[in-house]
Image: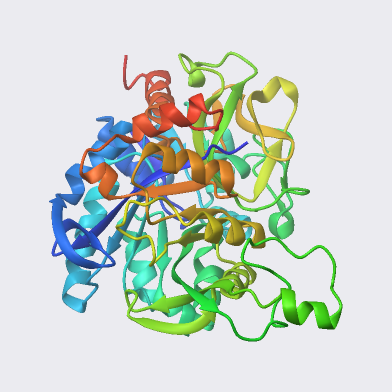
Amino acid sequence: MLANRIIPCMDIKDGRVVKGTHFKDLVDSGDPLELAKKYADQGADELVLLDIVATVEERKNRAGLVRAVAEAIAIPFSVGGGVSELSHINELLNAGADKVSIGSAAVTDAGFVKKACDRFGSQAIIISLDPKRVIDSGNPFASTERSTGEPTAQPVALADSIETNRLPLLKWDVYIKGGRENTGVDVIEFAKKMEKLGVGELLVNSLDRDGTKKGFDIELLDKISKSVNIPVIASSGAGRIDDFVEVFKRTGVTAALGASVFHGRQFTVGDVKARLKLEGIEVRQ
Amino acid sequence: MIAVVDYDAGNIGSVANALKRLGAKFEVTSDTDTIRKADGVIFPGQGRAGPALKSLQKSGLDKLLPSLKQPFLGICLGMQLMVEKLEEDNQTGLGIVPGKCELFKDISPVPHMGWNKVNIVQDSKLLAGLKSGSYQYFVHSYAVKTDKEFTVAVTDYGGEFASAVNRDNFYGVQFHPEKSAEAGEQILNNFLIICGEKR
């Protein structure tokens, strides 16, 4: 059986690791290479590097950083940020990244995702998505699911359904451009579509939880991990070790990301794993 | 000196990086003479079986590699190419180790990707000092089945497959020791010891 993974995530701007809330109010959190080494030593199973600027100029420096990280650590890592062409992926893999994550471009260009998976293999392609909760109180017949995420047991008579199904429906829209633009795409539909195109993994952020340290969006992650067969990586909201325990116990994710909890030395990857093991959750130690 | 075989089959960079970290003397090469004279040979690989074998045939490496007498380590696709039959692209392998390599069935997702346990079933210099059940990093869609006498470790993913093999001077590992933190480094270090490059 595969071990559940703990993955420190580094948002990178101008060659430094930064962290903010909802991609704003960025605080310097250190040198990416030093942190990469530290996390590998702590027992991280993988690393995520995200270039949050991803301008043309930045891309040149980024290949150098990727090369340096690949030389320094003996665990797999992914790199993302502004990836929208096959040449970007090629460049990052050649520099030593094991996987590349695609964000906005995956929502706007399904053909690109397909080509990327065909050319580089499923194992090399991660889709990073930014969902945000929307309350849809509209058409009561639009879905047979209630806000609990559980399907209703039996279809009810029309008259009853008008009464009982008028509950606000919990759903998530996929946002792009660092959370600035709502595409109106339903996150579950999107996740299934990505799986069909051959994507290897889904990295599921949450615009509602990012940087809040209020815990992962359990309902979202439960719903997505039940909808697809590919590995789902939980991201956004880790604030306590308990949050990691909860996400593995209550959802089908097989990996969880932490950023500021690790950068701010609140606890180490080793601390998280020790606790998960106590809770009977399979981890590599 | 260790020869790392370069035959257009994917990412040899990570193997080179790992050898650098271990302070090994090595050369990335496709030259048959250099490979023949090396103290040890590492045969990495990533990608598809068909094009990889074609490339080996073109350079004559398909004949040279099975005849080598020095320690030899196939990694991932490198190990898969060592067997007789490959389901991928319906290929005939190098035949260094009997057996076949088949697509994972009855389990999803495929590829098998991530950290999984390597359970040692036979003593081997390659896995010396390694705890049975230690985790290594895997990325593959096809898996090797060979005779018990050549299987030194197994891994479970919808059934057991050979995750490490050994026949005489030939070793193979399905996982990526170069990406498997300390447990992987130990295996590469063991290989350097087998080659006489380290003590």
What color scheme is it? rainbow
Q: Nearer the viewer, residue A229 or A153?
A: A153
Q: Nearer the viewer, residue A66 or B144?
A: A66
* Total marks placed: 0
Q: Is residue A10 visible?
A: yes
| Quadrant (top left, top right, bottom left, bottom right) of the N terminus of chain B | top left
Q: Is residue B64 visible?
A: no
The quarter holding residue A171 reads bottom right
Left or right for A115, reference A29: right
Left or right for A228, reference B196: right
Measuring 44% from the left and 53% from the top, which residue is drawn there? Answer: A216
Residue A224 is situated, as x and y percent measured from the top left of the image, at 59, 61
Q: Nearer the viewer, residue A7 or A261?
A: A261
The quarter holding residue A10 reads bottom left
Measuring 38% from the left and 19% from the top, which residue is drawn there? Answer: B193
A48 shown above or below B136: below
Residue A165 is situated, as x and y percent measured from the top left of the image, at 71, 75
Left or right for A188, reference A52: right
| Quadrant (top left, top right, bottom left, bottom right) of the C terminus of chain B | top left
A285 shown above or below A26: above
The quarter holding residue B79 reads top right
B6 shown above or below B138: below
Q: Nearer the viewer, residue B149 or A157?
A: A157
Residue A107 is situated, as x and y percent measured from the top left of the image, at 48, 79
Residue A49 is situated, as x and y percent measured from the top left of the image, at 30, 56
